[in-house]
Amino acid sequence: MLEGLRIASQHRIGRIILGLVMGFIALSFAVWGIGDVFRGFTSTRLAKVGSGEISVEAYRSAYQNELRRLQQRARRAITNEEARRFGLDQQVLQRLITEVSLDQKARSLGLAISEDETLRLTRDENVFKGSTGKFDADRFKQLIRDAGYTERSFLLEQKGSYLRKELTDSVVAGLEPPRLVLEALHRFRNEIREVDYFLLPAAAVGEIAKPSEEELKTYFADREQSFRAREYRKLALLAVTPATLAEPREVSEADVRKLYDEVKAKRYGTAEKRHLRQILFASKDEADKALERLKGGLSFDQLAAERKLSQKDIDLGLLEAHDLGDKQIADKVFASREPGFVGPVQTAFGSAILQVEKIVPSVFTRSYEQATDELRGEIARERAAPSVRKLRDAIEDQRAGGKALGEAAKSAGLEAAAVEAVDSTGLDPAGKPVPGLFGSEDLLKAVFASDVGVDNDTVATRDGGYVWFEIAKVEPARQRGFDEVKEAVETALRAEKQQKALTERAEALTAELRAGKTLEDVAKGAGAAPKHVNEVKRAPHPELSTAAIVAIFEAPPHGAGSAAVDGGRLVFQVKSATTPAYDPASIEAKAAADQMQPAFTNDILEQYVGALEKVFNVSINEHALQAATAGADQNQ
């Protein structure tokens, strides 16, 4: 064939025919699958982001890692169809596009970080610290291995992550939630209402007539699944967690006090802040002379004007001690109890004189005495962590030797607990929560994915502990017959009819209130006692249920309404609605601002990244995206 082509190419007519044939072949490629060549894509490029790109292999690796983590949390296999239904493919792609966009912007700004600095920052990450509070190499290796990284690939990703964080931190530095939003939140949280109300008891609608056999059967047929018996499992359970091994009584008062002093500003209030202004000088002598002039009466603004500095050049803003980045400088700046001048202090940019213009004192919402039990337990749990790992190894050794869970527990000096019956929601047949399940959805999913006689994997708890279980018996779910649940059906039907009649009666009484009758008169006519309650907020109240509070704030000022409560229905009238003035300097306002800060900065960052993506003109090869996730199916 090749020889024939060579001979044909030597004649004019042959060359024309070959040209037509090759043109047809090229057109076929364009139509049937490699048109990406003409559209700017290659077989290995999934997305183009400015001058950067996301390869199919990089996307597939990120997607499979995320899918693996999702499967580990769910403790079952998850198909690509399920993952796509959850939006996992698009989430991974968007994350990679965001990272490439930020990487390009960081490079254009000249941001860089050395390998030594990357390693130092990584070692400082709390997640890699052991019980001693120091970097734990074994823990580090285990965590990155579980996440699917080698040490080199993880540090490379960390390097990019730190550069992206440096960029995004600079974007949101100094931003605070808008006052308008904080005021709206203040009004929502602090609106106070005075309410008159009375309880319309269930007995107010009289006795509900006994339903007929036909009514009961119809009701059961319409709600058959509601009366289905759930599946229950009997199991042996052994938990080894920091909480179960902790000994709070052994923690000294001094250790608790030390931890409180370390965390009180972050957890229980706000640290002291100071509004600072700064002027830099080339030498200490020059700074000393300037300080003398300031002490002699020269204002800071005048000194700045002499040096041709604007307010923007000298104003550092409202800062906490850690914001200064240098403990020695922070100690000097925060030593004075009154506003004034500090310096000269040596900085990385020269000698500086700082002016403390304003001091915002620290405010704490919980005292040492109030936080003692919590912190004592925290310290005890942290100290128990090494014992958790030792016991885990000892129990695993026993299980590997073929011992049942109860025997393995006894050999380690522990006792396995017996759970007689539990359903998939953690409730017993009486509908009460089963103690000892540690609020773990992962544990319940694992229990109901297993069976009698199965050697189950250990379930990790969120506090770094482990739970073992064995299924002793399975009582399968089943559909119960009408005769078996007849009594329950009658109770449910009567309750439904009673609630309907009670709602109609309450609506009629509410209409009377809206027509102008006083609540006292309406209550008297219903045979109920009127009550009055002050200072009702959108928060738990000792006299009112959550449903009642929601209904009260859905009604307009001086409006009326009703809400279902235990024992009947609450009929109410709003007497007044007031909101205290907003004080941005109050403890509550500062706490609200701190709570909103993450959401606010995240919103700004989303807009910033979105703008970058528009600038970089992101384009996606949908065929490559589908192929990449399809390839993940084959690799499972």
Image: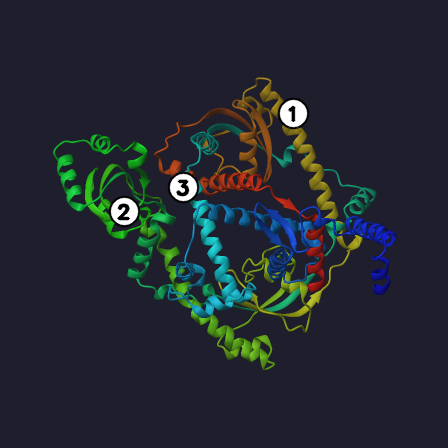
Residue sticking out furthest to the front: 11
Q: Secondary structure at mark 2?
A: loop
Q: Residue at x 61, y 43 (%)?
A: 618
Q: Is 197 situated left or right of 289 in this image?
A: right
Q: Which residue is mark 3?
A: 173
Residue 465 in view (yes/no) = no
Task: Locate residue 122, reporting x and y percent.
Answer: 43, 60
Q: Secondary structure at mark 3?
A: loop
Q: Is 36 situated left or right of 609 in this image?
A: right
Query: Label 2 is placed on what type of residue?
Result: Phe
The quadrant the C terminus occupies is bottom right
Residue sticking out furthest to the bottom: 401
- Marks 3 and 2, how far apart at CA: 21 Å
- The circle drawn on residue 636 is none
Q: Which residue is mark 2?
A: 349
Q: Residue at x 69, y 46 (%)?
A: 39
- Marks 3 and 1, how far apart at CA: 57 Å
Q: Which residue is mark 1?
A: 508
Mark 3 touches mark 2? (CB < 8 Å): no
Which of 526 and 40 lies nearest the eye of the viewer? 40
| Crowd around label 3: few <14 · some 14–19 · many ≥20 (10 Å) | few
* Comes first in the chain, label 3 or label 1: 3
Query: Label 3 is placed on what type of residue?
Result: Ala
**Pair 3/1: label in front:** 3
Q: Secondary structure at mark 1?
A: helix
* 419 over 532 or under it: above or below: below
Which quarter of the picture shows residue 131? Answer: bottom left
Query: Label 1 is placed on what type of residue?
Result: Ala
Mark 2 touches mark 1? (CB < 8 Å): no
Q: Residue at x 55, y 39 (%)?
A: 615
**Pair 3/2: label in front:** 2
* Comes first in the chain, label 3 or label 2: 3
